[in-house]
Image: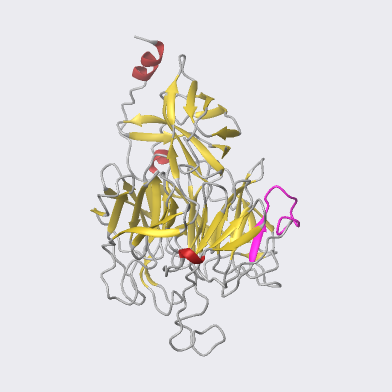
Amino acid sequence: MNRRLLVSLAFCPAVSFGQQGAWEDPFNFGNPTQGFTVAINLIHVWNGQTTKVLALQDNVPGTDRTRLWTPAPASLPGAPGTYVNVEAGQLLFCGGASAMADGRILHVGGSYVNYVNVFDPILPVGSQWNNPPAPDMMFDRWYPTSTTLADGRVLVTSGWRCSPYHTGNPTSCDPGENPFVRTPELYDPATNTWDLLWVADREQWIYPFMFVLPDGRIVDAGPRDTSFLDPATWTWSGSIPDPTYPNPLPLPPGEHGSAVMYEPGKIMRCGGSERLVRAVATTWVVDLNNDGVGWLNAEPMNKKRRNHNLVVLPDGKVLAVGGNELDLAGGVGSVDAVLEAEIFDPASGKWTLQPPSHPDHPRMYHSTAMLLPDGRVVSAGGNTYPTAQIFKPPYITSGAPRPIITFADLYMQYGQTYTVQYNQNGGPVVTRACLIRLASVTHGFDQDQRRVPLGISTETPPGTLDITAPADANIAPPGFYMLFILNEYAANQFAPCEMAAYVQIGP
């Protein structure tokens, strides 16, 4: 019997690990001197030194509430962290955003504008926006999706150019006017230019669930039908019928739902509803590595939700947080808040209900949530709620020992093998590793989110392992990721390291 096996067998905890997480105390998001922020966007950035989160509110010059947040460590539960004002000087309300290969953030559109703003986390505060600037898009886009592609270019899809709901103001659609922007636009960071993709003309719902697939195609996974875009020709093909959209309903029931790619090519979506209709709890999964299967009905959530957020966790499970059952007047009158979180296990297809968040801080329309590098999840915002609250998943509340990374490379090339060193910290040897892309979330959908399991081989003695980077950029588009290593602290229960390592993936 080798030494590694002896160490693994020696760690056989007698305690029973629970499946319940816990909430820390809520805190004000921002500071009294500069004002508090309703975090309509949460964007995870890395400046080479510390974790930063860009929180956007409206960015109207003179009333700005955009902040760069440094989270407090897990050793200070409920602490607000620190905040710095980072006004862009342009309206950013309800736009889209994604991280480019070099770590800069491309923010596109907003409330009927074609503005493009670039945020560089490496630059000093005060010079981080538009240094250098990018040209604006051709079309105004309210509620667009921004998707970083395998070649480093950024695809922007959908959005409204006028409002089909608001009447009697300059943003209203004319009678019979189609509000949807049908033509995608493509940004090339290398040339700082935009291309209009006329050949890809197609009506998509606002904030479409766009993902790069392992075979190179780009999928629109809802909230309407599921279709595929070929970046070689920029043509759409191969639709999969969407079971949540029984035509001829005027709006898809999946509106204000959410979706997540929890493994390459594997997508889960849940919840949502038509406008002014109560939400559903339905959950659907699809493995697009096997197109012949189509969407499969999984166990529904325990709670009906719309305006919720989905966060993929290092152990491969998915956290649903916040939301509400019914919206009145486009989200302004959100009612029936859902306080309980719940966790979906793709292995079993089942949900586990979690404790409720603070009743005075519901997370409904315009709320956000994202994974922190210590494995916790921050849930923030929602109309009129400039606060945040942090959830500790069961792998933290279990009290199981979590490994500590002591060395990892800062840059990885596709298909190469790298050595990671770690301290077991009293737990078993590490048996899993994954990458999770830094978040860029708004309106219940993280436009950058993906989790990529890594090949791993453990060396003897414990404390050193080799990991294999993703095979290509279709599996992990270029950019910054968090590297998590995990141990199996109980049967089929995995605890991530105490702090992820930031790595940049590229060719």
Q: Is residue 459 above or below residue 279?
A: above
Of 348 and 507, nearer the camera is 507
* Count of marks, rendered view: 0
Image quadrant for the N terminus? top left
Left or right of 79? Residue 376 is left
- Judge whether residue 89 is colored magenta: no
Main SS of the magenta segment?
A: loop
Quarter assignment of residue 227: bottom left
Q: Position of residue 165 (x, y in %)?
A: 45, 82
- 484 vs 131: above or below: above
As for residue 120 lying within the magenta part, the answer is: yes
Q: Nearer the viewer, residue 184 or 207?
A: 184
Q: Name the residue: 40% across, 52% down.
A: 260
Residue in view at x 69 percent, y 60 percent? 85
Question: Is 295 on the left or on the right of 155, as rendered?
Answer: left
- Of residue 122 and residue 64, the one placed in the foreground of this image is 122
| Residue 26 visible in the shown view | no
x, y (%) of residue 121?
67, 50
Above or below 103: residue 472? above
Tell me the magenta residue range: 116-131
Asked whether the viewer can see residue 452, the reply is: yes
Quadrant (top left, top right, bottom left, bottom right) of the C terminus = top right
Whole-percent x and y of residue 298?
25, 52
Query: x, y (%) of residue 439?
Result: 52, 51
Q: Nearer the viewer, residue 124 or 174?
A: 174
Specify the color scheme: secondary structure
Q: Using residue 53 as the reference point, say whether residue 286 is left or right of it.
A: left
